[in-house]
Image: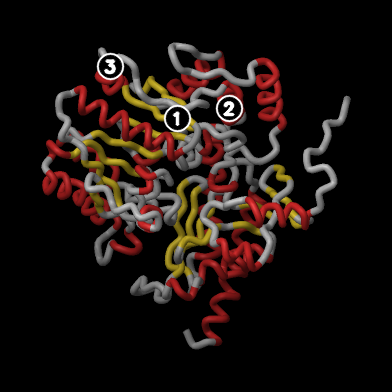
């Protein structure tokens, strides 16, 4: 078999780092950091591990909580190569399709909760959420209620990085840094973050209270002015906030009561990460619209989807004329083929069931055993293969250390020095490992985090903190 030429030719690591520093603008990166030291170059990956600069690391974040199936699956490379040779591209405008977009749409609707059978394919989670917002606006316009413009989001939310989706986020700097003031149509409800905001309430009582903050906002704004509520089933990016069991059923009841559409942002939780195909199924509610990305193709190629209920589709598609929305690469044949193969492999190999019945419970038990009693740890949160370690200053009061101490960054750095990638989010260590992770690899995660926490706690004690 002929060897394919290496696109990098004879470029050295130092040359690549120089090219990158001079020309590549990085996401969520301080440019000063790149000026002070060169970027770390990841060169290969397989299973749960990534390798760069002769260093092999266990990636407990699966990239950005997205490489669900694990790195380096030959089946996905073969699917991409086969389709790229046969149909490298065609658009999905003007009533044109391709076999892979059609088959992927059917597969998503078959896996989705009952009554969700229309799928709009795009390229990223941000585009999927933006599509949902536009379809909500179209729905209410067609229903003759154009004043329903307000979107309710929550503290600690993350829904994307475009102008519209950034306005929904709990991280306000994602909009304000660029000079955009907060949209007058975005309203904020309390997050179901029991550990930080539950006070003396039980998790179940706090779940109801947090849900009823949504009702308070609807009543303050006037139900006739509220278009939709959008929420991640589990708030991932801002700290794996697992809501109390009472929360989502009550939110759904409130939305139904006032005719407010319910959008589930399943970009992280979709396609098995919770031990169910979708987070809605794990947490006991049904949305009108859901957004999907990351795990749809395990991020081997960029692809996302917005799935809408039959009832909403019936309103939107009734005499709408030309739907004035789309992207050049919506329904791209190669990305759709890879996504379809990815979903088939997850299904055929029983990965979702393995997370539900084995890997999720094992991970939770091991993390709790290793860290729940640690003096630096306030709470361990786990749902399937989504996990968080919340650091605290005082277990009894749940007080936090000042963020300026960057304790989670130090824990993360300690883990990295031991060969483990986790993510620091404020005072929370976040993990979303690949579905292919083994018990032994989960054991390694737990032991490394315990050691890293020991080091940070010892340093605090020596400083009298």
Q: Secondary structure at mark 1?
A: strand
Label 2 SS: helix
Q: On screen, 110 above or below 303?
A: above
The quarter of the rendered structure image containing the N terminus is top right
**Residue 310: x, y in percent?**
31, 20
Q: Residue drawn at (83%, 34%), measured in percent from left and top?
A: 5
Residue under the image location 43 percent in, 35 percent down = 127
Q: Residue 365 in the image: x percent, y percent?
A: 52, 55
SS at circle 3: loop
Counting residues from the N terminus, which is met first, the one under dot 2 or under dot 3? 3
Residue 447 in view of the camera: no
Quote the CA–CA distance across marks 2 and 3.
28 Å
Label 1 to label 3: alpha-carbon separation: 21 Å
User: Which of the 4 quarters of the picture holds residue 343?
Assistant: top right
Circle on res. 276: none
Is the Cβ of the residue at disc 1 closer than 8 Å to that at disc 3?
no
Q: Which residue has dot 1 on it? A: 305
Label whose residue precedes the other's in the sequence (2 or 1)? 1
Q: Which residue is mark 2?
A: 335
Which mark, residue 320?
Answer: 3
> Would you place residue 298 above or below residue 119 in this image?
below
């Amino acid at each position: 078999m002929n060897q394919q030429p290496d696109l990098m030719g004879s470029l050295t690591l130092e040359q690549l780092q120089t090219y990158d520093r001079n020309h590549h603008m990085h996401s969520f990166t301080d440019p000063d950091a790149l000026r002070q030291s060169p970027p770390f170059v990841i060169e290969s990956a397989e299973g749960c591990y990534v390798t760069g600069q002769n260093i092999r690391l266990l990636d407990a974040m699966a990239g950005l909580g997205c490489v669900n199936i694990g790195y380096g699956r030959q089946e996905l490379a073969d699917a991409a190569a086969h389709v790229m040779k046969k149909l490298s591209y065609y658009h999905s405008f003007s009533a044109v399709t391709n076999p892979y977009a059609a088959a992927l749409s059917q597969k998503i609707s078959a896996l989705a909760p009952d009554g969700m059978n229309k799928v709009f394919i795009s390229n990223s989670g941000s585009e999927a959420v933006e599509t949902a917002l536009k379809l909500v606006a179209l729905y209410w316009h067609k229903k003759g209620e154009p004043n329903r413009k307000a979107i309710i989001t929550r503290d600690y939310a993350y829904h994307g990085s475009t102008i519209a989706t950034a306005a929904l986020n709990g991280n306000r700097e994602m909009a304000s840094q660029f000079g955009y003031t907060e949209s007058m149509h975005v309203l904020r409800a309390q997050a179901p973050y029991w550990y930080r905001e539950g006070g003396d309430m039980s998790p179940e009582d706090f779940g109801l209270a947090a849900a009823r903050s949504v009702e308070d906002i609807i009543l303050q704004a006037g139900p006739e002015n509220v278009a939709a509520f959008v929420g991640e089933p589990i708030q991932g990016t801002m700290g794996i906030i697992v809501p109390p069991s009472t929360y989502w059923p009550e939110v759904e009841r409130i939305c139904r009561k006032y005719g407010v559409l319910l959008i589930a942002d399943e970009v992280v939780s979709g396609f098995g990460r919770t031990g169910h195909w979708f987070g809605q199924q794990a947490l006991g509610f049904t949305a009108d619209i859901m957004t999907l990305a990351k795990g749809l193709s395990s991020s081997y190629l960029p692809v996302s989807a917005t799935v809408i209920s039959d009832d909403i589709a019936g309103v939107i598609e009734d005499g709408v004329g030309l739907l004035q929305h789309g992207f050049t690469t919506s329904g791209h044949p190669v990305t759709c083929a890879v996504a379809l193969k990815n979903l088939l492999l997850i299904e055929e190999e029983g990965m979702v069931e393995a997370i539900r019945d084995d890997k999720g419970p094992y991970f939770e038990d091991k993390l709790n055993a290793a860290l729940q009693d640690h003096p630096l740890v306030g709470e361990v949160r786990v749902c399937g293969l989504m996990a968080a370690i919340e650091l605290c200053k005082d277990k009894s009061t749940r007080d936090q250390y000042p963020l300026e101490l960057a304790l989670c960054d130090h824990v993360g750095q300690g883990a990295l020095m031991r060969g483990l990638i986790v993510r620091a989010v404020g005072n929370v260590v976040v993990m979303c490992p690949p579905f292919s992770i083994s018990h032994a690899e989960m054991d390694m995660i737990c032991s490394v985090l315990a050691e890293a926490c020991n080091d940070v706690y010892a340093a605090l004690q020596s400083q009298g903190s």
